[in-house]
Amino acid sequence: MLVVFIVDSANFISSKLKAFSFSYGGSNLTVEYKTVALKDRVQFPATALYYQKVFKTINLFILVMKLSLIKTKKSEIRTIAKIYMTEFSKPPYNESWTINKSLKKISFFYQFYDLYSIKADQELVGFICINPNFLCPGDIAFGEEIAIKEGYTDKGIGTWVLNEISKTYSKKGFKKLMGIVDTNSRAKKLYKRLGINPSKKNILIEKDIRRT
Ligand SMILES: CC(C)(COP(=O)(O)OP(=O)(O)OC[C@H]1O[C@@H](n2cnc3c(N)ncnc32)[C@H](O)[C@@H]1OP(=O)(O)O)[C@@H](O)C(=O)NCCC(=O)NCCS
C-alpha cells in the first residue's frame, strides 16, 4: 500500500479540491482528499520520497510511503526487540524491559508465533505478532503485540496493518481476531474504530500473588 501525506499549510485541498492526480513510479495515482491524513504533527522520515505539485500559486509537497508487512527475518530480531523495549517502557505501560528480556521474547515470537515486520519504504518501523494457536488452534488469531516506533505513529500505519492481518487470517479460515489492551492506552480508540470490541464471552482474570 502507498500512504500519501501532503503538506497543505494553506488548507488548499480541504477547501477547494476533491481529488488530484500525480505520477508515482510510472503510474498515475489519484488521491481523494478524504483519504489523506492532513495532520500538522506529521514528521517526514528521512528516507521519504517527495514530489512537488504546483496548483497555480499553491505548492503542495507530497510524500509517498510504501508500506509492507512481511514475515520477520532472523536478522531483523534485534531491531524489533529495540522497538518493543522502547515503546513498552513508555507510559501507560511503564514495563521494566531490558534489551535481553526483549530479545528473548522476540526470539520466542519468531520461533513459535507469526511475527511480521512492518516496513515503510525500506525501513523497519514496527512489528506485529500473532499467536495462531491460542485456545483451539486455527480459530483465533491472537494479537500478542503490535508496536510502531515513534515518528511513524499516527500516520495510518497501524490501521493498515490490522486490516491486512484481519484479511490474511480470515482467508486462512480463522474466525476471530483477539488481543489484550491496557485500559489507559490510546490504542483503545483505534481498536474501537476498527470494530475490535470488548469480548462478550471472555474476561481477563488476575490475582495479586506477591504475598502468597
Ligand atoms: C498502537 C499503534 C500500533 C497504532 O499504530 P498507528 O500507526 O499509530 O495507528 P494509526 O495511525 O492507524 O491510528 C492512530 C490511532 O492509533 C492510536 N495511537 C496513536 N499513537 C499512539 C501511541 N503512541 N500509543 C498508543 N496508541 C496510539 C490512537 O488511537 C490514534 O488515534 P487518535 O489519534 O484518534 O487517538 C502505535 O501507535 C504504537 O505502536 N503505539 C505504542 C505501542 C502500543 O500502544 N501498542 C498497542 C498495545 S495494545
Image: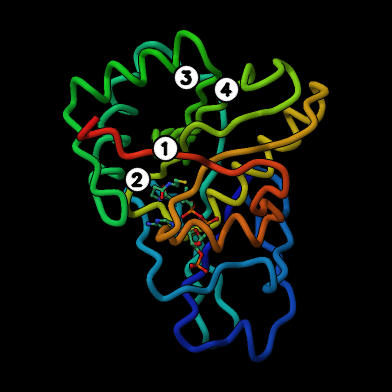
Whether the residue under disc 2 has CB within 8 Å of ligand 1: yes
Residue 112: where, in percent of width, then height?
A: 50, 10
Q: Report which residue position mark 3 lands on.
A: 72
Whether the residue under disc 1 has CB within 8 Å of ligand 1: yes
**Amino acid at pointer 3:** Thr
Of callouts 1 and 2, the N-terminal one? 1
Residue positioned 72% across, 69% down in the render: 32
Residue positioned 63% across, 16% down in the render: 133
Judge left or right: residue 206 versus residue 53: left
CB within 8 Å, label 1 to label 2? yes
Tell me the element at label 3: loop
Q: Report which residue position mark 1 lands on.
A: 126
Q: Report which residue position mark 2 lands on.
A: 149
Q: Nearer the viewer, residue 128 or 58?
A: 128
**Amino acid at pointer 1:** Gly
Q: Nearer the viewer, residue 70 or 23?
A: 70
Of callouts 4 and 3, the N-terminal one? 3
